[in-house]
Image (tube, rainbow, N blue to C red):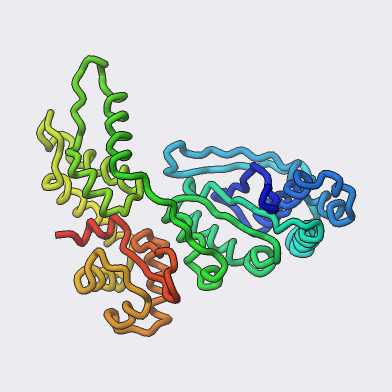
Amino acid sequence: MNAGYWATNEVLPVYPDDNVQRLMGGALGGLYDAILTARPAMAEHEAMQRAQQYVRAFRLTSAGANLSILGVGAGASRSTSAVTPAGGVLLDGPRLIRELLDLSLRANGKGIVLHLNNLENLSDRDVANAADILRSLRDPVLLQPGLHTIIVGTTDAVTTATMSHAQLRSVFTLLIIEPLPLEDVQKLLTTRYRFLRHHPNKRVIPPVADAVVATLYELFRGDLRGLLKALEEGVTLLLGVAKLGTPMTMKELGPALRQRYESLLRTTVSTARLGQLNVWGTKLGSDATPTQEDLIKVWKVRQSSVSQALKELVQAGHVIPLPKLGSSMRYALSGASRLAFQR
């Protein structure tokens, strides 16, 4: 607010069963709240009065959500006690949003910030649906002058939502927050192990050696969620097999995780995409961060085919778009895919 951008401390959640109308209505409500917070006297302005009937209708919509604490899945239910005319927000929403943004700019605001959240609680299919909704909102909402949209979530969720469609890649800029330092990750795990002891006087025996955490940290490029998931899956796979009382090493954990992620690759992508990933992993190396031009050469296909392949691989969670440096976007294999190709 001090910098001239208007916002509230509320976030606009993205639900599993969302659609264009609901998210547009939520955006309209967010703009209305931001203006009301920054300039309460503007409540009587004609543009605010016109928007108010739609905002009230959304406020009268009761919603309940059942979100997994671990971020594994989510569900939501709603019951409506009042509605706007059928399709009204789709017809009038863009005009009302434009009027509210113009109102804020004329009042010397630098723009209004909308914060979209909850992507990490959505399934892969729901995130893909969110990407489709954002594509539909690109021209009528996202490209409106004065609107600044921030989308927050895990790297995989945000990249799938904002980079799956070519129409959105010029709208959003990816900013990956610096990962937690490895030293802090080790401390976090040590604290967790201590908490999980059956008795406070018992000695803490970590399930894996520190070197395993360091290796996974590098493979997942500091992605804490991916690292913890790999640890959980690997340890679970080896329960009853690994030696009790001794932390597992990468020599033990590595083959189990590779088998797990190789199976995941085979069941989540087509044979053609699996072949392209194999070429990437073997010819370029699992650490490579190629551009589309690089992949055109090694895959020996046209640019349109590379773009489609990357879209599918990003949606499946096997490839991650990296923040743009220079004129070309680069891509990297996800941590799970890098593990699958390690030998």
Residue situated in front as seen by the camera: 179 or 11: 179
Could you tell me residue 161's position as x and y percent?
50, 60
Q: How many marks?
A: 0
Q: Is residue 103 left or right of 247 when viewed as pictured?
A: right
Q: Which quarter of the image is occupied by the C terminus? A: bottom left
Residue situated in front as seen by the camera: 174 or 229: 174
Is there any visible trace of residue 186 in the rendered image?
Answer: yes
In the rendered image of this protein, does residue 49 appear above or below residue 208?
Answer: below
Specify the quadrant of the image occupied by residue 181: top left
Is there any visible trace of residue 91 in the rendered image?
Answer: no
Residue situated in front as seen by the camera: 271 or 317: 317
The residue lying at 58 percent from left, 66 percent from top is: 135
Farthest-out residue, front: 2
The residue lying at 33 percent from left, 48 percent from top is: 226
Could you tell me residue 83's position as x and y percent?
77, 49
Could you tell me residue 182's position as x and y percent?
29, 44
In the rendered image of this protein, does residue 3 appear above or below residue 213?
Answer: below
The residue lying at 27 percent from left, 31 percent from top is: 190
Could you tell me residue 304's position as x and y percent?
43, 81
Q: Is residue 46 left or right of 90 when viewed as pictured?
A: right
Specify the quadrant of the image occupied by residue 109: bottom right
The residue lying at 65 percent from left, 67 percent from top is: 143
